[in-house]
Amino acid sequence: MKSKTNIQNGIGYVSESGGSSSPSPPRSPRRHSKFSHCRRRVRSKAHSQIPIKDTLVAGILFRRNLRYLLVLPLLYVSGLLMCVGPFSAFIGQPALPGSVYRSHEIFQKLWHEIESDNSSAIELSSVWKYKRKLREQKPCPNLTAVQHLSIERVPLGSTGYLIVEANGGLNQQRSAICNAVAVAGLLNAALVIPQFEFHSVWRDTSNFGDIYDEDHFIATLKGYVEVVKELPDVLMERYDYNVSNITNFRVQAWAPVSYYLGEVYSVLRKQGVIRLAPFANRLAMNVPPHIQFLRCLANYEALRFSPLISTLAKKLLNRMIEKSSKTGGKFVSVHLRFEEDMVAFSCCIYDGGRSEKHEMDLIREKGWRHKFKRKGRIISPGLNRVNGKCPLTPLEVGMMLRGMGFGNLTSIYLASGKIYQAERYLAPLLKMFPNLHTKESLATPDELAPLKGYSSRLAALDYTLCLYSEVFVTTQGGNFPHFLMGQRRFLHDGHAKTIKPDKSKLVVLLEDLNISWKYFKDQMEAMLSESDRKGMVVPRVRKINRKTSVYTYPLPECRCLQQSHTTQVGHNLNIPGTLMRTKT
């Protein structure tokens, strides 16, 4: 119990936002001093004459501390259970099923069967067996900011100017931008084009205009939220042309609407300009309909990649379609999180032995200093793997897809950063899927040159190709797949068209040295079917559920924009409608 608790609370996992911080494991609960003092007092009172008044006071105190009598036995039992985990390691208890990486051994054992098994290769167009039946939606209400404010005849942006500094990687910044548009609409503020905070992990100096089309962003939001490229000179002069002199609100995560209206609005009206930095998930998911509408509008209409990125993305997409001619121009995209910093931060163990451990220790020390050596920190790679927290290797992704029925002629687009020991770990995946492509293999060096060294711009290329693939495979969570799943649901009538593997089940199968290829295939086909079913599920919206995000589950809240957005996307990239909305 203790190991599991500490792993979940003490070990973070890299997401697109960098994931460089994670809370320390909770300390063991202390015995409350009041209880022992109260217990001694009660014992002494039994042997002395006590006035009625004092007796009543003692009774009240006893009842007040009665909860400790109930809690202490639970703490005692919990303490015993928490000791079982570490102690079991010393008495030779067998490792949990799936806790040891043996995928490379399984692959060697089954390779001949995998290589010869192409008789049942599935057609990409028939992957999705479930079809979503959308309920009839009520007519879209008039929720524009203009109509909302016209009742009081308040000009847009008249409250003041809002400056935000978005942090994280590409899609965490995207979340910040959409939330900033919503907050600006809520406060009736003029939004200054968001600034991007330089992150020590992503190390990308790109500005908003380097990644997104500024003019399109401003034009799309016109009539809903006033957007300007910079503060008026009169305000800049007031603050000595130094933005850091402007009052900054450090807003708590998932702040409710009431916070902005109660705390921020009055300061904004008084000073005419405020800053929100850092700014990402600083607005609750539960907001009024006309504010949620602004989030949808920003994410699915206003945010369009810059001409440089979108032009190159279109070229790469067309080349990928050409290379997928044997499968009707359809291909599978895989978001692989097997970069060295991801492997190091996950604290998982693969098949590299002592040299791998030494290398990972050095990377952890360089990137996060003493984070993983703090007192009380327990690192359990086996539990990480059993709990599905370890990044899948290219080999594991390949075996999973071949088991699901994707033949070796299937074209795959690999969206990834620099893969850890790429030559070694990519070799098995290339054996299973020779038609493997990346942005580096599809583009020429000259075409990629303007984007080199800018992780967010390169991620935008990956995002675009994954968006228009027939199948998208996510392997490790984070903002990138969450936004992609949401936008693919938006494009495909509510269906994610995404494979999200059950990694806890997968690692158990890939540790069984006696497993047969037939049994593995049966399990993978069932996993594909379950992933397909979950891809069309719409979770119940709860006020306190932060994971029920309009960015991941856009319907039904963003339904009003769906038709116009589909047309707009095709126009932006000049992609035929049949490629954008493939029929099942």
Image: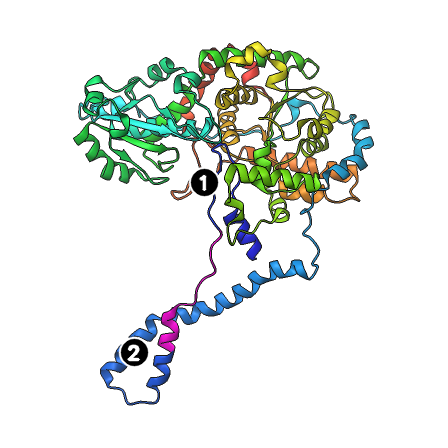
In the picture of the structure, the residue carrying the numbered disc 2 is 58
Considering the image in quadrants, where does the N terminus appear?
Answer: bottom right
Choose between 153 and 230: the one closer to the eye: 230
Measured from the top left, where is residue 353 in percent x and y? 70, 41
Give the residue at x 42% y 72%: 69
In the picture of the structure, the residue carrying the numbered disc 1 is 540
The colour scheme used here is: rainbow
Magenta stretch, residue numbers: 25-39
Q: Is 81 drawn above or below residue 69 in the view shown? A: above
- The alpha-carbon separation of the residues under discs 2 and 1 comes to 49 Å
Considering the image in quadrants, where does the C terminus appear?
Answer: top right
Give the total number of marks visible in the rendering: 2
* CB-based contact (under 8 Å), mark 2 and mark 1: no
Please indicate whether residue 473 sits to the left or right of residue 241 in the image. Answer: right
The type of residue carrying mark 2 is: Ala
Q: Is 125 drawn above or below residue 369 in the view shown? A: above
Q: Is 241 drawn above or below residue 499 in the view shown? A: above
Q: Within the magenta stretch, is there residue 556?
A: no
Give the residue at x 52% y 23%: 459
* Image quadrant assignment for residue 522: top right
Q: Secondary structure at mark 2?
A: helix
